[in-house]
Image: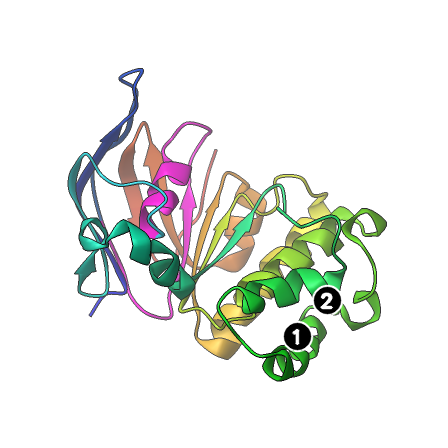
Amino acid sequence: MPIIKFENVKKSYQNKFSALRGVDLVIHPGEFVSVVGKSGAGKTTLVKMIYAEGFPDEGKVYYGDRSTDEIRKKLLPFYRRNFGTVFQDFKLLHQKTVFENVAYAAEIIGKTNEEINEAVPKVLAVFGLLEKEDKYPNQLSGGEQQRVSMARALINRPDVIIADEPTGNLDPVSSMEIMKLLLKINSNMGTTVILATHDNDIVNMAQKRVVTMDKGKIVSDQNPGKYLI
């Protein structure tokens, strides 16, 4: 069974801009999929639909056998626990340390202090952040902040990691490091990874499935694929 499925999904905004125009897409468990295209192509709208940050005007989005439009509003936080999200602007809590930022994601789903104190060092080690656990975000480089964001996304062992332009604020070297970590998460843990980006260098380095969008439509779906601007 697919882990994610779009069936003829359409989405427009109040200014009548059509962000998605009849999108059909199937993603299987354990896949690494790069969703690519120029700014405004519909990438961010598409990934938001997956973790129910937005809903289709027409069509359906499924996680497993469940359509997102069937989820009651009060249950959305529980649904979103299936996903770890990584964003361009990191979205770290600047008053909290690296350890506390990662721990916070476990706290809000009710994990005990004992569980948190065991799990956080392990995930920080995966991202080479153990020596930074007492630092605050403003004491870190951009690449380090994004690694903290990824550690936070992974702490609850989600089924899917969604990375929306995760290298948008990073230099080329840091961008490649982040991409290698996403590939490592995918290959070592079997986590499904969905990457939305317009960075053709990191996409082509991965040699994974590439879904290309343009003006709200999927215009190419290749596995493995390349992204050519």
Q: Is residue 69 above or below residue 185?
A: above
Identified by mark 1, the residue type is: Val
Reading the image, the residue beneath label 1 is: 120
| For marks 2 and 1 on the same chain, the one whose residue lies earlier in the sequence | 2
The image quadrant of residue 8 is top left
Q: Give the alpha-carbon distance from disc 2 to disc 1, as whole Å.
A: 7 Å
Residue at 42% of width from left, 36% of height from top?
37
Q: Is residue 41 above or below residue 111?
A: above
- Report the residue at 72% width, 43% height from top: 171
Residue 10: x %, y % from top left: 20, 34
Q: Is residue 188 left or right of residue 23?
A: right
Q: Answer above or below: position of 54 versus 96.
A: above
Asked if residue 222 shows in the view, the reply is: no
Q: Confirm whether residue 14 shows in the render.
A: yes
> In the image, what residue type sits under mark 2?
Phe
- Between residues 229 and 66, which one lies in front from this camera angle? 66
Residue at disc 2, secondary structure? helix
Mark 2–mark 1 CB contact (< 8 Å)? yes
Q: Secondary structure at mark 1?
A: helix
| Camera-side residue of 97 and 31 | 97
Range of magenta residues? 25-50
Q: Magenta stretch: residue 45 in it? A: yes
The x, y position of residue 229, in whole percent, is 48, 33
Tag 2 residue: 99
Farthest top residue in view: 15
Q: Please identify the quarter of the rendering in which residue 172 is found.
A: top right
Q: Quadrant of the N terminus?
A: bottom left
Crowding at dot 2, Cα within 10 Å, few <14 / some 14-19 / many 20+, comes out as many
